[in-house]
């Protein structure tokens, strides 16, 4: 029979200036060899542009997350479905609240 393991958490005052990555550790770590699926989302809105997230180096003990601003240019409201071009705007200078959930089946 499989074990279904979940963990959730938040990171208050989350920021990743200068394109840095922040490490979030699981407590406790998932079993050796079990790599969870990680879902993360910004819970606040502390700036003029929308912060996007990137995850990497997901292991049984931790994951790394970074935040970048994204924005849409060339959008037109007269054409249904024309969302314009999504572009990166660099670092997101504001602190946000990050919420995450990790799910693993072992």
Image (tube, helix red, strand yellow):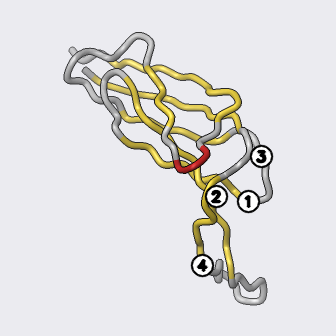
Quadrant that contains the C terminus: top left
Q: Mark 4 or mark 1, which is nearer to you?
A: 1
| Residue position marked by numbered label 4 in the rendering | 85
Kindly check if marks 3 and 2 are in contact, taking CB atoms under 8 A apart as contact.
Answer: no
Count of numbered tags: 4
- For the residues labelled 4 and 1, the Cα–Cα distance comes to 14 Å
Q: Is residue 71 left or right of residue 88?
A: right
Cα separation, mark 1 vs mark 2, equals 6 Å
Give the Cα distance between marks 4 and 3.
Answer: 21 Å
The picture places residue 32, in percent across and down from the top left corner, at: 22, 17
- Spot occupied by residue 38 in the image (x, y as percentages of width and height): 43, 35
Instruction: Identify the residue position indicated by label 1 in the image.
Output: 49
Circle 1: element type: loop
2 or 4: mark nearer the eye: 2
Q: Residue at x 41, y 32 (%)?
A: 63
Residue at image mark 2: 69
Element marked by disc 2: strand
> In the figure, residue 11 lies in which quadrant?
top right
Q: Secondary structure at mark 3?
A: loop
Disc 3 and disc 2: Cα gap in Å?
12 Å
The circle drawn on residue 45 is 3
Specify the farthest residue to the top. 28
* Label 1 with label 2: CB-CB less than 8 Å: yes
Q: Is residue 53 above or below residue 23?
A: below
Which label sits on residue 39?
A: none
Answer left or right for 106 relative to 86: left
Labels 4 & 1 near each other (Cβ < 8 A):
no
Residue 104 vs 78, above or below: the answer is: above
Q: Secondary structure at mark 4?
A: strand
């Amino acid at each position: 029979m499989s074990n279904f393991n979940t963990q959730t958490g938040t990171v208050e005052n989350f920021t990743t200036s200068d394109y840095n990555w922040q490490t979030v550790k699981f407590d406790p770590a998932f079993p050796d060899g079990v790599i969870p699926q990680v879902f993360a989302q910004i819970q606040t809105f502390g700036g003029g542009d929308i912060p996007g997230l990137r995850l990497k180096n997901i292991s049984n003990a931790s994951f790394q997350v970074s935040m970048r601003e994204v924005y849409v240019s060339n959008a037109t409201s007269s054409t249904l479905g024309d969302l314009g071009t999504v572009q990166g705007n660099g670092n997101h200078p504001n602190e946000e609240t990050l919420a995450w959930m990790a799910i693993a089946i072992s």
